Amino acid sequence: MEKEKVLLKIQEVGVLAVLRGPSPDLTLKMVDALIKGGVIGIEITFTTPNAIEVVKNLHQEFGREILLGMGTLTKPDQVEEAVTAGATFLVSPHTDPTLGTEMANSGVPVMMGALTPSEVMRAVGLGSDVIKIFPGSLGGPAYMKALKGPFPDIPMMPTGGVSESNLVDWFKAGAFAVGAGSNLCPKEYALSGEYEKITEIAANFMAAIRAARNHN
């Protein structure tokens, strides 16, 4: 899928599920449960056990049924690993010149982590397509809204502290999309085999996103 199409699809879906699955097998089951609930934006972090294997398996299993990316990139050599495995977008928790340049040169959508105005502009300068506002919990929707004041045209995706209950506030503040981890896909439900609960949360999350956008 072309870069611009992936970005438009992420914006349309509105959420990336940030997964640090406990094992490759359970991660696949978590993704299947999320898909059943309507969440097709999947970000597998490099902190996931056997992360590259997981992405390869997801790519083989679900193909273009999902938007599959890799997050928590901290080293330049992870960029090629991720894209080769099948990642269609890349996310880092921070903005680093060497890593950022490598990410921007990958040809896939890039989301670099930033928090302050200076970090936001540094990420944009390095070629970040969307700015990952991280940790979003630190300042909340009000902080991102303040950032959007001087940077109205920079797409921002808060991650950390995003929940079903505050989605309206995030989208009202101007979120391009949101990243959600344990509030969307609790690891304990995978460990206990209660995947239907993950599906239920995912469905509720998607309903809340639709309501949030209608609210705007």
Image (tube, rainbow, N blue to C red):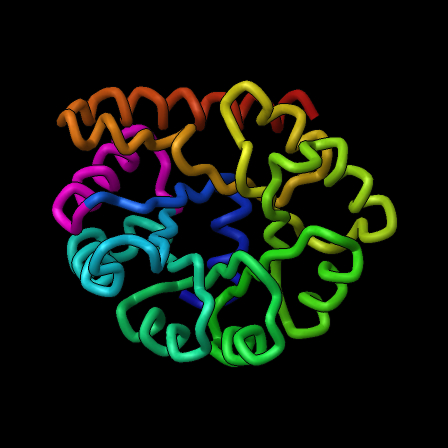
Please give the name of the residue rendered at 42% of the width and 38% of the height, measured from the top-left corner: 181
Residue 95 shown left or right of residue 153 in the figure: left
Q: Is residue 110 above or below residue 117?
A: below
Query: Which quadrant would residue 143 be assigned to in this image?
Result: top right
Residue 119 drawn at (x, y percent)? 72, 61
Q: Which secondary structure is most common in the magenta stretch?
A: helix
Closer to the camera in the image, 164 or 96: 96
Let me know if residue 128 is in the magenta part: no
Residue 198 drawn at (x, y percent)? 28, 26
Residue 99 shown left or right of residue 187 in the figure: right
Screen quadrant of the N terminus: bottom left
- Stretch in magenta: 23-41
Residue 26 shown left or right of residue 76 in the figure: left
Residue 22 drawn at (x, y percent)? 22, 44
Looking at the image, how many numbered discs can be counted on the residues? 0
Please give the name of the residue rendered at 23% of the width and 55% of the height, measured from the top-left corner: 49
